[in-house]
Amino acid sequence: MGLEPVRWENGRLRILDQRHLPEREEWIEAATWEQVAEAIREMAVRGAPLIGVAAAYGLALARRSGADEQAARRGLAETRPTAANLSKALARVARADDPLAEAEALHEEERRACEAIGRHGASLVPEDAVVLTICSTGSLAAPGIGTALGVIRTAHREGKLKEAVLLETRPRLQGLRLNAWELLRDGVPFRVIPDGAAAWWMDRMGADLVITGADRIAANGDTANKIGTYALALAANEYGVTFAVAAPTSTIDRMTPTGDEIPIEERPPEEVTRVRGVAVAPEGCPVWNPAFDVTPAPFINRIVTEGGVHSPPYDFAKSLSPTWP
């Protein structure tokens, strides 16, 4: 793929500003942890695994500059509280004698994990398959080929993919803007549909697999992901379509028993009332804008990690022994 949206260069963290895609490619040159935190908070960099990587480099910047590391760790942790990778990456780098080397090692491990997720996940894809997905789960969300989009890329490489169907993913349109941008670059066949068309698509057009990413997976398999994922899982279960989640083990939070304990970030109402800065709602319109929802484990048929394909019932508190906390 060759797309590296987070790069350490010349003592700074270069971040591809996803807010401007697909119209133009702009880069942020972050020299302080505060700049990294702002990039994460404002979704210039996004996707749970990539957020963790960026935050790791941010904490390394704090150590190199002599900043208050505890303040930096708290400030970075508060940017996107739902993503499990964020707090884990910060804890790991905080313990390291050489935080930059640790951040670079973490970055490479996540890249390799995504390659393995792609291989394992492709085993769920039948021949001539139509695969639905939501949000952005490629190289703009995780190092390397990505998570759910990495599975789609691998299936395409193996000649099994007929078409990927991307939900537009309101309110920030990550599916339409980012997943589509990546697949166009790769030459992978796809089309975009409105979020509300997913069930009707399954009814009229059919699907062979629904696969999504994750921002946090509880010990029992309950999964927080981009808002709209729960509705997609309900539709998939209604139509007998396998619903799978693809994520590295760094996204699994063994200390969170169920989805009820996952903190759900709420975003500013302007993300709903405006589209790319243009007002589309009457002034003063009340808004509820949760960034994520939680899909209960009974609706998840498979969870794919770098360790393989997991089947229900899930008990990650006992079945995983990751090196991360």
Image (cartoon, helix red, strand yellow):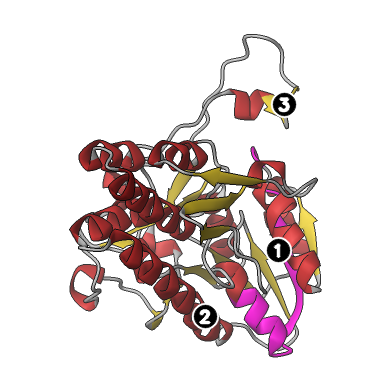
Query: What residue span does the magenta drawing correspond to?
Result: 151-172
- Dot 2 or dot 3: first in sequence order is 2
Q: Nearer the viewer, mark 2 or mark 1?
A: 2
Q: Is residue 191 above or below residue 316?
A: above
Query: Would you call the spot at circle 3 few (<14 residues within 10 Å), some (14-19), or many (20 or more)?
Result: few
The kind of residue on which mark 3 rests is: Gly
> Contact (CB < 8 A) between labels 2 and 1?
no
Q: Quadrant of residue 186?
A: bottom right
Image-based side of 4 in relation to 254, left or right: right
Query: Would you call the spot at circle 2 few (<14 residues within 10 Å), some (14-19), or many (20 or more)?
Result: many
Look at 25% across and 74% down and name the residue there.
Answer: 322
Query: Residue 298: x, y in percent?
Result: 39, 63
Query: Residue 144: x, y in percent?
Result: 56, 72
Whole-angstrom CA distance, mark 1 to mark 3, is: 33 Å
Query: Would you call the spot at circle 1 few (<14 residues within 10 Å), some (14-19), or many (20 or more)?
Result: some
Whole-angstrom CA distance, mark 2 to mark 3, is: 36 Å
Q: How many marks?
A: 3
| Residue carrying label 3 | 277
- Dot 1 or dot 3: first in sequence order is 1
Viewer-proximal residue among 281 and 43: 43
Look at 65% across and 75% down and name the residue there.
Answer: 152
| Disc assigned to residue 115 | 2
Q: Is residue 61 above or below residue 7?
A: above
